[in-house]
Image: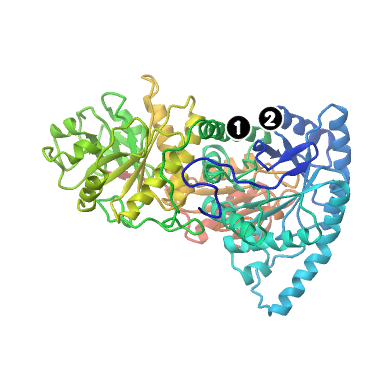
Amino acid sequence: MQLYTPSLTEYKRLATKEVKVGDLLLGNFHPIRVQTMTTTNTMDTMASVAQTIRCIEAGSELVRITAPSKNEAENLLNIKNELRKRGYNTPLVADIHFTPNAAEIAARIVEKVRINPGNYVDKKKFEQIEYTNAQYLEEIERIRDRFTPLIKICKEYGTAMRIGTNHGSLSDRIMSRYGDNAIGMVESAMEFLRIAESENYYNIVLSMKSSNPQVMVQAYRLLISHMETELGHCYPLHLGVTEAGDGEDGRIKSAIGIGTLLEDGIGDTIRVSLTEDPEMEIPVCKNILNRYDQLRVESINKKSIVPETDGKFLSPFEYRRRDTFPVENIGGKYVPVVVSDFHKSGNISRENLEAVGYKYEHGTNKWSIGDQAADYIFTNSPISFALPGTLKVISNYNSWLTAPDKNKYFPIFDESKYLDERNQRSLTQNFVMIDCYSENYPAIDNIKLFERLKNDHAAIICLSTNNKNSVQSIRRKFIELMESDIKNPVVLISESKCKGMDNNLIQYSVEAGALLLDGFGDGVCFGYQYADNKVNSDAKVINSISFGILQATRTRISKTEYISCPSCGRTLFDLQETTAKIRAVTNHLKGVKIAIMGCIVNGPGEMADADFGYVGSGPGKVTLYKGKEVIKRSVPQEIAVDELIVLLKENDAWVEQLERNY
């Protein structure tokens, strides 16, 4: 058993301490709580109250409000009193950065305070500092002196605390000592946690947020391991991907980061950080948690049939891709492929291909291909027209036998047909479906199957399962493959029976994203029963989701990435409008990471690994960054987007939008 999860093969919640936030209980197997954060100016009492009420009525069980200075901290009392007067008793959380005195005021008013150990005492100047052990201990004592007063206030008033580490705001001291990585994030929190425990204060929740789901997941797992090893217990965990962005991308990134941890029973409260109105975050939270209500019921009603494992082939604290040999463009060092599934939708048309990234020009009889064009399509119907040069077709065995071009068409077998020596095979690519421990699936000779795969360098494995604990089932099969030293590439299959594309997005993101973050998978294929009148529109969305998942897991970059904060009372411009404007003019810059931050709190540090940054620096003013370096200060907001484009061009990050023809 791993120190970061109760089980690798079935859904089990991680045991954590119970924390009281007002009348709300967190951890200790209580329901996973949903929360969000207001975007209003905290000094505008009525606007903050109105937005808080909208969030509560949408289903938020805690609401966080920024308190960047003493004035805002003091005004939390007016907000709280007005809410209580109107009959709303939902716990409030004060969000604190840089200002311990504001935290000490807020802790006397609201039910919980959030502090960031990266900037509660330390300042960030991106300096490398060499400390002796004695000097470092002096720094810890300096933190103790500044942090202890808040602890004592929280104990006196019964106030809970979140020690909320953000990857992008690690202090120079931590980065100099431990590095800009998951270990640095964990140690940043542990320093504060040790001080709190030395004062016998335990009403604590922790978080390890990053805009990169890969870093986020590793940090939470590592934190759990450190707490269990050093303290012998684990505190409740608040899950979230910070600066996830908006729209489809923000939902995908959040579902992957949060869902990967929830799959392992990790997490006691969640927040989806979207660059949208805060009440829009709540339905996404609920869609994610619906999955775990079902898994919990399943785990209570019947024991998992997935074999136990010690997980020795897993790499939970760092990314390591499973070693495979390439079969054509799948596996090896190739980026994961996207397979678009049309096998239930009848005859394929040119319009179907346009939905997955290929556009046919009748006048020139040529195809143009976008950066998010599917690599394969899966269909059982014959295709009556010439295909684009890069596109390949997967079809069932009988259809493949009559296929016109064996260089473009490849067969897919179930396990028994693959083992049948009488069946023909492609010389270059054969796709083999393997079910992962589903109850009603016919048993096959695993030893014979594995021996054949091991010696077949044209075989690509496709892993799927009907089990509700699908991530655990497929991950366990990967371990079995690795134990048998099978290095064939694997395509991940997720078949959705969900209603509504929002739910499909969550399922695909969790089921594929969790495995990709663990280094498993050389391609994705998402099954869906298209309605007759919605084939093209739904196929287009699922294709976009496929590439979005690969982008969010950093396994295949096909578009611009936006690291956009969700806005709060500190924000100095209309973040949603600005994000839309920047996206409209830069969304063709494949691989460029642009951070859009509302204020300096979410400034150069929080941008983490962004290439360029657009940060509010004052009313109507913007500062532009290249990496962590300030390039232009106090740019008027009216021309700031144009100046960002100039900055991109000056640094050879700008290209004109082109189409590739075939």
Can residue 374 be seen from the camera position used here?
Answer: no
Percent coordinates x, y for residue 375 in the rendering: 31, 43
Q: Is residue 348 above or below residue 192?
A: above
Q: In the image, 479: left or right of 578?
A: left
Give me the residue at 68% from left, 42% from top: 28
17 and 641: which one is in front?
17
Instruction: Find residue 394 and report its horizontal and vertical position in percent.
Output: 25, 37
Whether residue 314 is visible:
yes
The image's mark for residue 598 is: none
Residue 71: x and y, percent?
87, 48
Of residues 328 and 424, which is closer to you in this image? Answer: 424
Q: Which residue corresponds to mark 2?
A: 59
Q: Are marks 1 and 2 in contact (CB under 8 Å)?
A: yes
- Say which label, 1 or 2, has the lower sequence index: 2
Which of the 4 image quarters holds residue 400? top left
**Image position, residue 611 (x, y; %):** 54, 58
- Quarter-wise, where is residue 187 in the image? bottom right
Which secondary structure, mark 2? Answer: loop
Image height of 400 relative to 161, above or below: above
Give the residue at x 82% y 56%.
151
Instruction: Residue at the far top: name it.
Output: 533
- Tell me the kind of residue under disc 1: Lys
